[in-house]
Image (spheres, grey):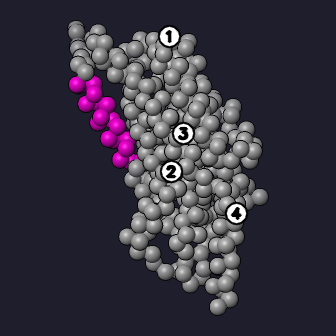
Amino acid sequence: MIYIFFSYNLAFTVLFTGINLPYATLTALMTQDQYERSVLSIFRMILATCGTLFIKTCTLPVVKFFGDDARAWTMTFVVFGFLEIVTFMITFLFTRERVNTTEDENRLKIPVSLGFKALVKNKYWFMATLNLILIFIAQGINGSAEVYYTKIVLGNSSLVGTFSVALQATQIICMFFIAGFVKKFGKRNLTAAGFVLYGLGSAICWMAPTNMVIVLVGQFIKNIGGLPCAYVFMALMADTYDHLEWKNGFRVDGAAMSIYSIITVAVGGICTGVFNILLSKTGYIAPSLVDGVTVAAQQPDAVKSMITFCFVGLEVITSVIVFVLLMFINVEKGLKEKQDEIAARREAKKSE
């Protein structure tokens, strides 16, 4: 199977680095089979999860092996850097892009303006990108608020680690079942159902934001709901590239991924800034230093309410919006016929 070949080439790269963003583009270019594309995306996220766990588990033992001092940390990251270079080279040398346009047309340089214009006019890509922006905004605000929420609202800052472990445990338990659900229900439908659970879990947390048990239950439901988006949404994005090629006669995967990269980088910083502004506007009181000890201040109710909304409330709203938008992204319908037409065009072009 093609996804075994693909995952073999990328396994060490993602495992050692935890970096998987460029491979979302490769997923679209490795195959046009919708199910294989989904499995590729799932493998990518499985390896990203494994890479994160691997680095977290191995870093300190490696540091201690080198002496557990400043030099040891430097040597550890030299080793990781070497492994990163080697695995990226494996990917570069052995991963094959199988999705190409015609021999003549595919070699032409598509003007940047034409590529972006085609993307914006592609309704499926446009709505999917709006979804990504909403998702990244909600996750960015959520991530900024997490430490404040656990410390100020729940009164236990160590729960940050608990939330992280719960998320990874949920991913490990459920990731082996995603492919079967995709095959049965489709990427769009499964992702939409996931956001129903995602919003429900966040709503449960929002209803009782100070009850630790209820919050943990809500977070578990939310994590399950977020899995389809994390694992197969980029495969759905790849389907929009095929629709664009069918409509316009050329592919702009690179331009699409450039926009995706810009969104991921920009939204994170913007969300952090917005959250800090909200803290200031609602009257957040910074901790004070008393006899050399940092003492947290009692925060106003407005601050607690704002933090709670940022951590769980906003995701309820964005989940509803994303669900509605997903109902219009029916790009999977008729895609096989479009891909066959694209293939026929390529063959006709070659025979000219």
Residue 159: which disc? Answer: none
> SS for tag 4?
helix
Q: Marks 4/2: CA distance?
A: 19 Å
**Residue 11 in view, yes or no:** no
Residue 323: which disc? Answer: 3
Q: Quadrant of residue 31?
A: bottom right
> SS for tag 3?
helix
Residue on which the image places disc 2: 128
First along the sequence among labels 1 and 3: 1
Q: Marks 1/3: CA distance?
A: 28 Å
Residue on which the image places disc 1: 211
Vertically, is 234 above or below 99?
above
Query: Along the line of sight, which residue is nearer the eye, 268 or 54?
Result: 268
Q: Which three-letter amino acid code belongs to the residue tagged 1? A: Asn
| 118 is within the stretch colored magenta | no
Residue on which the image places disc 4: 336
First along the sequence among labels 2 and 3: 2
Vertically, is 27 above or below 133?
below
Residue 104 image point, x, y percent = 56, 84
With 305 as the anchor, is 225 left or right in this view? Answer: right
With 338 as the anchor, is 269 left or right in this view? Answer: left
Which is closer to the viewer, label 2 or label 1? 2
Q: Marks 2/1: CA distance?
A: 35 Å
Q: Which three-letter amino acid code belongs to the residue tagged 3? A: Phe
> SS for tag 2?
helix
| 275 is within the stretch colored magenta | yes
